[in-house]
Amino acid sequence: MREDGALYWLMTDHLGSTAATVTETGMLASELRYKAFGETRYAAGEVASSFRYTGQREESDIGLYYYRARWYDPALGRFTSADSTVPQVNNPQSLNRYAYVINNPLRYIDPSGHTYLCDEECDKGNWSPSLKQYGITLSGGWKASDISVIQQEVAVIAAALAGICGETCFGMPDHQVFSQVFGSMTFTLLDNGATGTGCAAGGGFECDEGARGRLAEDTQRGLVTHELGHNFDHSIDAWGYGRTMLSQTTIVDANGNYVEGIPFGGGAWARTDAGYRSDWFPDQQHPRRLDNLGQTAGEGFADMFMNWVQNSFANDPAGQARHNWMTVHMAEWVPKAMQP
Ligand SMILES: [Zn+2]
């Protein structure tokens, strides 16, 4: 595309979103990153185009995207008006006529405002090859539904890491940031006959056999991200960050109220439920009242990581305080974790 006489090339990501503009000589002129539902997460340089998320045009004055038939609001992840057609009568999700791409924005795009389309990868019905880009190898008898959940959570984590990384990650695809932060990992479904749905970090992600086909269940939602929160914690704990720093902290909200950590006036560090949407699954993957482990800063950090990645803290001052604590520190830790 041409602006003010200068020629720019628009580079797009796998959903066709404008990801970067490059000058004629190959210099990176600007870069854009998006949250899963299209809110702009990160912008650097002057983007000489209003065609952005999935290649659609953003009206930046009103924060809406024009999807030809309808306006789309990335902050809500919904269209602003009901669809005039019901795309697939046999799919209950398509009966929600405000929903965007049946609420699966990492997999589908919607070029017309009336439909949802697979990207090339999922058209082939084949998800695991793209996990290799993230440095992840699958082992054991995962079901396709598990792999789909893993794929989605990993992509959201990668977008969050890339979005907070700043200059260190300029020009890098999200999956490269992810694989550099976490290194190579194996995600294993154990062949152990266990009927429970237990999963653990273990240098990657590892689940009992009973978890097969169950990662999409409500209680398991966010579990992959919680466990990778433990892995992230382990990799930065050596520098005194993560759970170590959390265990020495008092988180206070904007009104001066105690949220979590060392109590006012001293005493033992403690987790609380303040700032989480609920005191149980899926908002906390290791609730503090579940067992003794639930009171540790390690589990506290993993749940903070999960809710920060998913932007799912409670919409109140305590939730904002947790979000801010994570954002400030992740902006320092992620670039550091990128160093070889
Ligand atoms: Zn945990």
Image: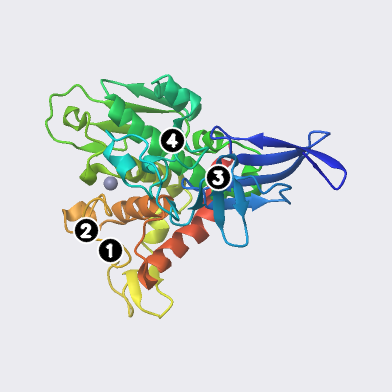
Q: Residues within 10 Å of mark 1 (few under 14, many from 20)?
A: many
Vertical placement of residue 196 versus 190, above or below: below
* Residue 179 position in % (x across, y down): 50, 33
Mark 4: C-beta under 8 Å from nearest atom of ligand 1: no
For the residue with label 2, is its CB less than 8 Å from the closest atom of ligand 1?
no
Q: Earlier in the sequence, mark 1 or mark 2?
A: 1
For the residues labelled 3 and 1, the Cα–Cα distance comes to 48 Å
Whether residue 203 is visible here, answered yes or no, is no
Q: Is residue 166 left or right of residue 181?
A: right
Q: Which mark is residue 271?
A: 1
For label 3, the residue is: 68
Q: Hey, what amino acid is under mark 1?
A: Arg
Q: Earlier in the sequence, mark 4 or mark 1?
A: 4
What residue sits 51% from the left and 45% below the top? 69
Residue located 42% across and 50% down the image: 309
Who's the residue at 41% across and 46% down the image? 84
- Which dot, 4 or 1, sits closer to the camera? 4
Q: Amino acid at mark 3?
A: Arg
Where residue 79 appears, x then y in whole percent? 44, 51
How many residues crowd around disc 3 within 10 Å: few (fewer than 14), some, or many (20 or more)?
Answer: few
